Image: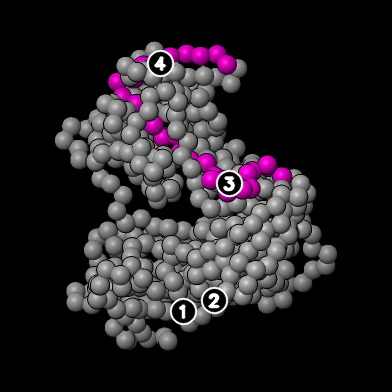
Amino acid sequence: MSYDLIVIGGGPAGYVGAIRAAQLGKKVACVEVDRAGGTCLNWGCIPTKALLKNAELYQTLTKKAKEFGLSFDNLQYDWSKVVGRSRKVSTRLAGGIEFLFKKNKVDYIKGHGNVLGDNKVEVIAADGTKQVIEGSKILVATGCKSRELPPLPFNGKSVISSKEAMVLEEQPKSLAIIGAGAIGVEFAYVYNAFGTKVTLIEMMPNILPVEDDEVGAEIGKSFKKQGINVLTDTKVTGTQDNGDSVTLTVENAKGTQEITADVCLVAIGVAPVLPGGLEPELDRGFIKVDDRYETSIPNVFACGDISGPPWLAHTASFEAVQAVEGMFIEGKVPRKVGNFPGCTYAHPQVASVGKTERALKEEGVEYKVGKFPFAAIGKAQAAADTEGFVKLLYGKEHGELLGAHIIGDNATELIAEMGLALEMECTADEIHSTIHAHPTLAEAIHEATLDADDHAIHF
């Protein structure tokens, strides 16, 4: 069978690239070893958000019921049904991707794809049968997997990755999490909300270390209030898998201590999942690509997590569209990822786009800061969810938006406006003159912009 494009990987890069190529009238095959949707839909973005919603609802009922005038007795939850709901959501959406393949006439081939020479791909099905298909162009979008901590390999029970964290049959009484990026923070929130004793360990000064320092410090304080044992500036210096538990030796400015937990979640980053067959040039283990997303092998392209950071579903989809349009639209100059939103869906949520204050200082850029707390927003008060703030960074000379950082309810929804503003090179004056509806949480963006010029109205 011959195709215009063979895509290896059916995640946010792969399936989006396949569908876009089909829309351009090309004959396309998408090879996926698991289910359509990849890690994001099946084992990442989507099922974790279902778990987070369950956790938020349960926490609201247990912590805020009286504030809303509600009372009840013997509130309980069924852990298996909590997990089961998240799996049902993923299954439903995976079926939706398969429907989109049919709608767009993309051939969906289940199996492990290996890149052979002469524009050929070998597909090995689950039963071991093999077939070889040929494509004028090949797009590798095989993504990443959780990275192991060498002294503490995954065993699926006492030492787990994020994949196992989503489907544990029994809720652990205690959980140690190594790494406080988005994955570690989200699972810390979920398990703590349901009563697991959680210890979150991060070697950097703040949890969510890629975020603005002030935001990282704020969510750290919030997590401590929620009962999570947050250890920052802390290194793991020793590990022991006890079979039914794990003991970690950690060290920080206060000294050395041992932490024993039923389960240890290792959330220290990701490792590339390289296809078999031809070996393209790599950069720190990830596939190196040029400005058109082409690898060192002619007619073999790569995009998404397999080609390196920022390892986000939405940037992977962006890259896939750019790569495919660059292949098949004459004169198209593909774009590389520039500004992109980063989101963490714990409670409070965290979202950002553009430069952090730390980065601007390092670059010697003169800037001004506008900040506004959700506590001063009527909509936040009405919803009894006043944690957090909006922090905006503008250029001092021209007033252009340089970065936006939000911590609080619906931060991950609010950040879209700031992403558009950054892309359009908006200034503080232009956001000043944009009327924001009342009452909304988005008013905090308007007020933070006013605060950058020292005339916020409501605080």
Span of residues in magenta:
128-157
Mark 2 or mark 3: name the one nearer the start of the chain: 3
Residue 102 visible, this angle: no
Q: Is residue 138 magenta?
A: yes
User: How far apart in space, not on screen, are marks 1 and 3 (Cα)?
Assistant: 42 Å
Check whether the beta carbons of the residues at disc 2 and disc 3 lie within 8 A of each other.
no
- Residue 398: x and y, percent? 19, 74
* Residue that label 2 marks: 386
Which residue is depicted at the point 25% across and 31% down?
Answer: 327
Q: Amino acid at mark 4?
A: Ile
Q: Amino acid at mark 3?
A: Pro
* Residue that label 4 marks: 133
Q: Amino acid at mark 1?
A: Pro
Check whether the beta carbons of the residues at disc 2 and disc 1 lie within 8 A of each other.
yes
Residue 147 visible, this angle: yes
Mark 4 or mark 2: name the one nearer the start of the chain: 4
Q: Which mark is residue 150?
A: 3
Which residue is depicted at the point 42% across and 23% down?
Answer: 277
| SS under mark 1 | strand
* Residue that label 1 marks: 373
